[in-house]
Image (cartoon, rainbow, N blue to C red):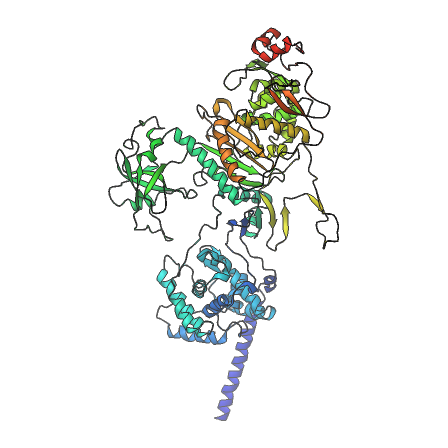
């Protein structure tokens, strides 16, 4: 027996050694192809790029995987406890593989063999890090062995906290969110530090199977799994029994933020920033690089710009009549589901979709669009309201030639019509006003003239209605809003605001074609000063001035100001016949407003990479001494403005003064009222009134806009820059400058202010009611004689005397000048 026992023992030892050798060979073979775990030390996962407004408010996020990296020190203990309890309670004690947990899992799986139940796993957090970062998800023995080997090696190379940090920042939580910080925002719209025990437990339940515990598709399973995690937290001593029971009573409370954050009314601005970032860094960096972008957007100014432009567009559109319903549905039964399926303008929350239920001569009964929950289920609540006839009178006129106008709601709308409405009064009110999205569009930009920072941008009535940004992408003719640059070029080249130009019909022959420009309205005023030409937007004077000056000079100035990249030097371009954008026009006016300094318009102040290093900043001015460690009675540091001067500061002031006259006496008279503040600007109206512009500025703010149809067409009678766009500018500027200190336009040193006759441009006579103070550069002044530029091309002297009382008076007083 002893010999037999020894024989079997020997055989067992041999078999054991053979098996051990086989296992060793197998493990060596598996281990030789293992990936290098040292890459974990340079872990740089795809991280969300976040875009902020000028005040720090979060505007937008861009990511393929919504993830925000958090160091382990920034993750609260209760959150870490929830994941340890759910995934690996012995994490801080095992060497990478939990042998106790593995044995327990084997027993459970043996007991469940043949039952159809899914096998129980025993992967530790370290093993999951090895799998997620270094291996595939294949369900094979080889992969599990590799996972275990890597886990032992990772545990030897990195601390437990580092491993947990990698895990919590990498794992997928569903709803396209990765990492605990991204998941907290996506599911609860909170930072990680704000998560409650119940919320942390629910997030800890998700890595096992986000789809299985979806908060809307499987709420019961989600709640059950969350409560199981809470029980494990209590069992492991992380949470008291009473706190655990209280946490289990809480609802899931998920408020999924599937579309990311959005600062109200900033959609056009944010999209313009996104396009710039792609152009500058590429899509990969935008969606994976974790950039932190601080923009120049002023949220309050943006709201004012949105409201002003929307008010102007709606006012114009309603004057043209009612376009008809958005859609028609069956309103005889439960209209809620059909109405809820119609997409509304998400960025115009003041308006709601409604269906017409009944119509009478005095009122319209409506049903309001019911909301949907996160799963898309329509609320059973059916709210109703009324539209009084007085609140929809504008709609009695039909803008559709196929429909007739009416004198009451009957005929304007009918049961089943889907329309937009806006609530009147407080929240308890059931009274509404009929609204309609306008067909006319426009764009508005506001800018700091000293830095080029774009403070507000509106690219149309609604981003939901159209993503096309009319402030930056629409190429439109600026019309007469271009004229100040013709006059600026002239005054930089020897003309003065008192120079007299002939305002009379002119013919331009080129290539066998005859061009006969006209003033708006068709009239002409005879000899007039440059100031008068700007104030009353005289086309004929501008053409004569450009012809006398030379279009090559005008083109050079237009390119210098950034209005055009390459301007064709033909006379029609002097009237703003070339295409440009609102942003370019506002940038060009900013050069005038800041005294002639070139600026680079920007939407972005600063960009930082994922590590906080600044990789871009807009401010290029130098500040010597700004980084002094302490103050030792030295002088205050000076900011060195090294930007190019593209316009004589004195010319800039002359043009500014002339454009003040546009508002005081000219084409915008009575349209702009900023409470006595200095303000200058210019209207613009293109041929056939297809575009209406206004661009203007105070010493500290420039704003410009246009109105027009996307497919250019006549705006109709009164569709001018003064009639349509100037009131929008006024509404915006009143709100924008309301709480800012008042400032004045600065007169450059050396400028001479001389009284002249506004009609003749000559020195004023005491007591002359037509006197105006005009600004002259050193060495210039009012003419001693009545000189008329461009006279001989169209009119004989005797004709001038007939059409111009001023010229006639000059002859009678013996100062006719050059005739």
Return the residue found at the far left. 332
Q: Where is the C terminus found, in terms of image quarters?
A: top right
Front residue of 787/202: it is 787
| 48 to the left or right of 117 | right
User: Can residue 569 be seen by looking at this rendering?
Assistant: no
Residue 491 percent coordinates (x, y): 66, 24
State whether residue 102 is above or below residue 219: below
Residue furthest front as drawn? 767
Residue at 44% from the left image edge and 31% from the top image edge: 440
491 to 271, vertically: above or below: above
The answer to which quarter of the image holds residue 737 is: top right
User: Residue 793: x and y, percent?
Assistant: 62, 11
Q: Is residue 533 left or right of residue 420?
A: right
Q: Which of these two is toward me, 475 or 814?
A: 814
465 with respect to 783 (left or right): left
Q: Is residue 646 left or right of residue 368?
A: right
Residue 431 image-quadrant placement: top left
Give percent across and percent down for residue 159.
59, 69
Tag count: 0
Say which residue appears at 55% left-offset and 64% top-offset. Answer: 165
Q: Nearer the viewer, residue 394 or 191?
A: 394
Name the spot of residue 77 as percent of width and height, x first: 51, 68
Which residue is situated farthest in the bottom direction here? 1
Q: Quadrant of residue 155?
A: bottom right
**Is any part of residue 374 visible from this angle?**
yes
């Amino acid at each position: 027996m002893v010999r037999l026992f020894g024989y079997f023992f020997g055989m067992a030892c041999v078999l054991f050694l053979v098996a051990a050798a086989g296992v060793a060979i197998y493990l060596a073979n598996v281990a030789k192809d293992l990936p290098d775990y040292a890459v974990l030390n340079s872990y740089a996962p795809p991280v969300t790029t976040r875009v902020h407004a000028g005040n720090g408010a979060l505007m937008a996020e861009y990511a393929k995987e919504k993830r925000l990296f958090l160091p382990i020190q920034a993750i609260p203990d209760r959150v870490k406890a929830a994941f340890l309890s759910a995934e690996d309670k012995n994490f801080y004690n095992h060497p990478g593989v939990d042998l106790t947990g593995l044995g327990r899992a084997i027993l459970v799986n043996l007991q469940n063999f043949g039952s159809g139940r899914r096998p129980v796993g025993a992967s530790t957090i370290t093993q999951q890090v090895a799998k997620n970062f270094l291996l595939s998800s294949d369900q094979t023995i080889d992969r599990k062995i590799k996972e275990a080997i890597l886990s032992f090696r990772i545990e030897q190379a990195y601390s437990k906290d580092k491993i947990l940090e990698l895990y919590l920042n990498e794992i997928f939580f569903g709803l396209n969110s990765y990492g605990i910080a991204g998941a907290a925002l996506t599911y609860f719209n909170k930072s990680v530090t704000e998560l409650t025990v119940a919320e942390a437990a629910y997030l800890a339940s998700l890595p096992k199977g986000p789809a299985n515990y979806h908060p809307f598709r499987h709420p019961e399973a989600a709640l059950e799994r969350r409560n199981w995690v809470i029980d494990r937290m209590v069992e492991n001593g992380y949470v008291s029994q009473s706190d655990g029971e209280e946490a289990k009573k809480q609802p899931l409370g998920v408020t999924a933020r599937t579309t990311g954050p959005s600062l109200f009314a900033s959609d056009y601005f944010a999209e313009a920033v996104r396009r710039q970032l792609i152009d500058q860094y590429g899509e990969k960096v935008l969606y994976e690089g974790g950039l932190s972008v601080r923009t120049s957007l002023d949220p309050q100014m943006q709201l004012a710009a949105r409201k002003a432009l929307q008010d102007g567009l709606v006012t114009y559109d309603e004057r043209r009549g009612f376009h008809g319903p958005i859609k028609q549905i069956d309103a005889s039964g439960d209209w809620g589901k059909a109405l809820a399926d119609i997409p509304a303008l998400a960025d115009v929350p003041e308006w709601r979709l409604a269906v017409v239920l009944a119509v009478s001569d005095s009122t319209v009964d409506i049903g309001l669009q019911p909301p949907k929950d996160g799963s898309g289920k329509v609320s059973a609540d059916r709210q109703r309201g009324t539209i009084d006839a007085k609140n929809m009178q504008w709609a009695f006129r039909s803008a559709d030639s196929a429909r007739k106008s009416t004198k009451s709601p009957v005929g304007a709308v009918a049961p089943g019509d889907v329309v937009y409405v806006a609530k009147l009064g407080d929240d308890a009110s059931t009274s509404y006003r009929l609204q309609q999205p306008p067909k006319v569009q426009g764009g508005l930009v506001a800018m700091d003239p000293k830095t080029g920072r774009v403070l507000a941008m509106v690219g149309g009535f609604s981003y939901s209605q159209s993503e096309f940004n009319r402030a930056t992408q629409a190429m439109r003719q600026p019309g007469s809003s271009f004229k100040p640059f013709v006059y600026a070029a002239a005054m930089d080249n020897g003309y003065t605001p008192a120079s007299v130009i002939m305002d009379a019909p002119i013919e331009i022959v080129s290539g066998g074609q005859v061009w006969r420009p006209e003033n708006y309205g068709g009239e002409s005023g005879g000899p007039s000063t440059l100031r008068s030409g700007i104030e009353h937007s005289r086309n004929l004077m501008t053409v004569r001035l450009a012809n006398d000056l030379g279009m090559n000079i005008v083109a050079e100035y237009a390119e210098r100001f950034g209005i055009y990249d390459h301007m064709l030097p033909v006379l029609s371009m002097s009237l703003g016949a070339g295409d440009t954008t609102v942003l370019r026009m506002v940038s060009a006016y900013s050069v005038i407003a800041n005294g002639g300094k070139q600026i680079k318009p920007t939407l972005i102040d600063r960009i930082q990479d994922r590590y906080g290093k600044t990789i871009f900043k807009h401010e290029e001015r130098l500040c010597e001494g700004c980084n002094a460690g302490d103050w030792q009675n030295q002088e205050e540091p000076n900011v060195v403005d090294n930007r190019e001067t593209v316009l004589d500061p004195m010319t800039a002031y002359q043009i500014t003064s002339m454009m003040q006259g546009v508002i005081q006496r000219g084409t915008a008279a009575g349209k702009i009222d900023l409470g006595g503040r200095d303000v200058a600007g210019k209207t613009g109206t293109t041929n056939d009134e297809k575009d209406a512009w206004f661009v203007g500025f105070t010493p500290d703010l420039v704003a410009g806009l246009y109105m027009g149809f996307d497919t250019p067409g006549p705006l109709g009678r009164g569709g001018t820059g003064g009639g349509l766009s100037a009131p929008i500018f006024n509404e915006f500027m009143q709100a924008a400058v309301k709480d800012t200190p008042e400032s004045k336009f600065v007169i450059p040193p050396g400028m001479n202010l001389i009284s002249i006759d506004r009609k003749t441009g000559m020195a004023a006579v005491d007591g002359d009611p037509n006197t105006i103070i005009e600004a002259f550069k050193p060495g210039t002044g009012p003419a001693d004689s009545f000189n008329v530029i461009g006279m001989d091309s169209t009119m004989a002297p005797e004709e001038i005397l007939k059409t111009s009382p001023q010229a006639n008076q000059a002859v009678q007083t013996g100062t006719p000048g050059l005739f």
